[in-house]
Amino acid sequence: MNKRQFLMIVAAVLVLGVFGFYFQAAQPSIETDTAASGVSGNGGQAESELSEKELLDKFQKALGIIHEQYVDEITEQELYEGAIEGMLRTLDDPYSVYMDQETATQFVESLGSHFEGIGAEVSMTDGKVTIVAPFRESPAEKAGLQPNDKIIEIDGESIEGLSLYEAVLQIRGEKGTIVNLTIERAGQNDLFEVPVERGLIPIETVRSDVIERDGKTLGLLEITSFSEDTADRFKEKLEALEDQGIDGLLIDVRGNPGGYLNAVEDIGKLIIPGGTPIVQIENREGEKIRYMSNLDERKPYPIIGLTDRASASASEILSAALIEGGGYDVVGEQTFGKGTVQQTIQLGDGSELKLSLFRWLTSAGNDINGEGVKPTVEVKQPDYFYTAPISIGEVGELRLDMMSEQIKNAQIMLKGLGHEPGRTDGYFSEQTEIAVIAFQRSNDLEPTGKIDEETASMIQQRTVEMVREKENDQQLQRAIELLLEQTNE
């Protein structure tokens, strides 16, 4: 397969490992018609439409003036590449981007079996680099980054004005090094800093487990992304589970940012009843192609999917196919809402465009872009699953009678850890101080009742450990309960 030219449904390429969708279609032309709508004239009045020659002459004139007269020296290559980036910004599409030679090379490298970075999917949204999804068990997830977090600074430097891939290059780095990300999060009044230790991110895309409960054997398949060999790995592990005589199957795509279109199509053919669409692809003229399942017989056991806010793109295709094509339940939260298909197109010098060429529609023909797929059984996790990391910063230790978002986050975590803070509004009360002392004593820390860097780090560590425990995973537990009910029907 030519890895440098494929259709993708991923939210964006990143530091962090990216996957694309390959779509068997004719190669689209790279040439485009010149846009000729409303060019602003003097006084803000719209000029009449210009011919292609007039537009090209205008472009060349602007190029020459800037190159020859701008106060600082700038190369023609920089201006041409800036023009390409400007055309893509005009599309107002966070998934259509220009990759220069260096970025395109790193993009291809990210398709390998592992890479070095923080392990997250990002896109450019409203002019800000935005987390689509941290990879499962990645440094980004362990540091507490969440979907829709916006990165404002990298290592204390504003990234305003940087392209997505310029920001990505700053986030990437050698395993073991630290990158400090300043984050803006909805619901948080203040920016906060998240240190992330870069790591080696393996691309193990399918994990298998067996759950024994109430005399039943349940299979669990976690898909972390849809890579080149994901469908093959899924088939192998599914057959191994079926050889064990499973009574039901859980398919977990939480935190999965997407991947190859053909991978999710091939997986769909293993579990979605034959004769029903897995996904539909729509072009700009509204013409649709349906990708049908050809499974001979419906599986003899019930299937339940698991989603969350970080389930994007290919994950959403599979979730929607389970619900609409298979009549199966999906437990969790509404998904991210990424419903367009991209293709990388080489520009001849090692640089590439990643351009949205199609929309994908669900099995039943629904457009989920910007909306997401709603689960049939909605379940939220405990509050401490969603808290931001505690950042002490320049304020120093958090103590009695202070009030801040950081204290609010600490209170939510302490409550989840079994140390009742008395309140979760961000005011450091006497009861909160008692809870901090109890936590410190139970973790062999000096019982000061104040939250310093060491205490904040330990609260975060213990919270991550809680999140990792399956018994605390309310979405998984509800899915298991529902699956057991269906196996008994």
Image: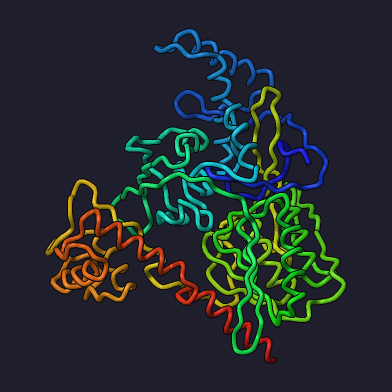
What residue sits 64% from the left and 47% below the top?
A: 19
Which residue is farthest top?
A: 68
Where's residue 398, x and y in %?
18, 58
User: To which quarter of the image does residue 85 belong?
Assistant: top right
Give the camera-side residue of 452 and 353. Answer: 452
Where's residue 435, x and y in %?
21, 72
Which residue is farthest bottom?
A: 489
Q: Give the mark count.
A: 0
- Drawn side of residue 108 relative to residue 181, left or right: right
What residue sits 77% from the left and 75% below the top?
A: 243
Where's residue 471, x and y in %?
47, 77
- Drawn side of residue 485 relative to residue 200, left or right: right
User: To which quarter of the image does residue 145 belong?
Assistant: bottom left
Give the camera-side residue of 366 and 169. Answer: 169
The quadrant in which the N terminus is found is top right
What residue sits 68% from the left and 87% below the top?
A: 487
- Drawn side of residue 183 relative to residue 272, left or right: left
Where's residue 452, x and y in %?
20, 56
The quadrant in which the C terminus is found is bottom right
What residue sits 60% from the left and 58% below the top?
A: 224
